[in-house]
Amino acid sequence: MPTTIDRANTPNDLLHRLVRGGLPELLAAVEAEGRSLPRFVVREMERFLRCGDPEEGFAWLWCRDCDHHRIVPFSCKSRGFCPSCGGRRMAERAARWVDELFPRVAVRQWVLTIPWPRRWLLARKPKLVRGMHRIAMKEVFAFYRRKLIRSAGKRSQTGAVTVVQRFSSDLRLNLHFHALVLDGVYARDAKTGKLRFHRAPAITTVEVEDIVERIARKAERWLARQGFGVDDPEAVDDTYPDDALAELQAASIEGRAAVGPRAGRRDRRQQVLGGKPYALPPRCGAFNGYNLHAGVVVGARARPALERLARYVCRPPLAKPRIEESPDGGVVLHLRRPWSDGTTAIELSRLELTQRLAAQVPPPRMHQLFYTGILGRRATWRREVTPRPPRPCGQDACSREAAKLRRSGSGRSRWFPWAALLSRVFGVHAWNCPRCGQRMELRAEVVLPPATRKILAGLAAASAVPP
């Protein structure tokens, strides 16, 4: 009786080994300073260590034709840094946005970064994230209405989906906003009574610079009214003096170690020759530490490109191929692309990597997605502009199952099965038997030990070659 185990997130890979060894070191180092990590951070990292472990639960598939058994372990479903769960969430959001949310019009990406001290403040105060996002989107929407007021009139609307990213390429805490905005406005046609999309003319660098200046000035005035001025002593968060997460987040933003033998020291970089000075690209503006970039736009018919862009803005903080074990037991974190000074990778110890990962865990009930404008959940015109889900192909059972679940009235109507995502992203039909190609059946869902260990031991014994 052949049996295979599909390990989407192997419990014994390099990242799991580093976190498994670095978490006790981090807890001991923090406790030595008389502090402690918040419970939600420790719980997130412990859940990651159990992600993909068959003993923690699995789905048991069985092929009736060839008696092949397939074990698919459950995931941890965490929101922090898990590559497997983050990749699944990335693919699901991108597929749903392209199929059911974004109309067939041009979409432009607006990326807003904020000054370094404000990044730490927003990471510590999740309620300020919503206010900062509201100010930025209000200015971007007003820009589109002013630009198209002659053709669309005053009663025009646009929409956006914003993803709050908390990381940079070197895993530093870098809270910034990626907004996918409809590159134009909708307005009601006076003759037909239907909504019509008005595409915005080409955006210039001067216009982006004007928008970022407006955002910076209004954001700083709003933060000052909240009691977080630039020179305000109340801006220092000392609500929880024993909370070590604040020090870990500040060190992660600055690119240094918070605790351990290298506490206070900067990252060790691997550089190559050929560094060059950094210059702002076109359609990018900066003002007092605020930076706004609007150089990426996707056409109305480029739906595959829009889905790739949506995956990019929803990507998890870390991909496993980017980490490499160093001879001294640490890790080399390769950057996505070389920096302007020639840096291609940074060297971190096991403890330093665990600190960076702990700083990436978002607080509970902190929203990382915002739907605004005409794409808002309660927008009046949303039903008129969003597309209907495409009909599934008759040969793809995974697509038919996903469409059936989305059309149902249950609470999981927008849930995408793993098999449907694998078929869409990688072209892999997960329900097909790896031996004969026939569709497998779900025999059971085993969720708790010791039942998991008993079934795994029984399948292993049945699969062993007799002496």
Image (spheres, rainbow, N blue to C red):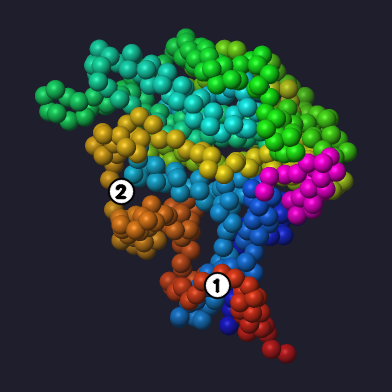
- Asked whether, in this view, residue 102 is left or right of residue 191, the answer is right
Q: Secondary structure at mark 2?
A: loop
For the point 39% across and 31% down, which residue is it? 372
Residue 323 percent location from the top left of the image: 72, 45
Q: Secondary structure at mark 1?
A: strand
Q: Which residue is mark 2?
A: 389
* Residue 32 on the magenta span: yes
Q: Amino acid at mark 1?
A: Val
**Most common secondary structure along the magenta stretch:** helix
- Check the image and name the residue furthest to the left: 191
Residue 209 percent location from the top left of the image: 50, 12
Q: Quadrant of the C terminus?
A: bottom right
In the foreground, 416 or 63 = 416
Badge 1 density bin: few <14, some 14–19, many ≥20, Cα 10 Å: many
Disc with the residue nearer the chain's start (1 vs 2): 2
For the point 44% across and 12% down, which residue is it? 207
For the point 40% across and 35% down, which residue is it? 371
Residue 397 percent location from the top left of the image: 37, 63
Up-down: is 111 above or below 436? Answer: above
Look at the image and give the residue range highlighted in magenta.
19-39
Q: Which residue is mark 1?
A: 446
* Residue 33 on the magenta span: yes
In the foreground, 291 or 125 = 125
* Residue 319 visible in the snapshot: no
Total numbered labels? 2
- Asked whether, in this view, residue 58 is left or right of residue 29, the answer is left
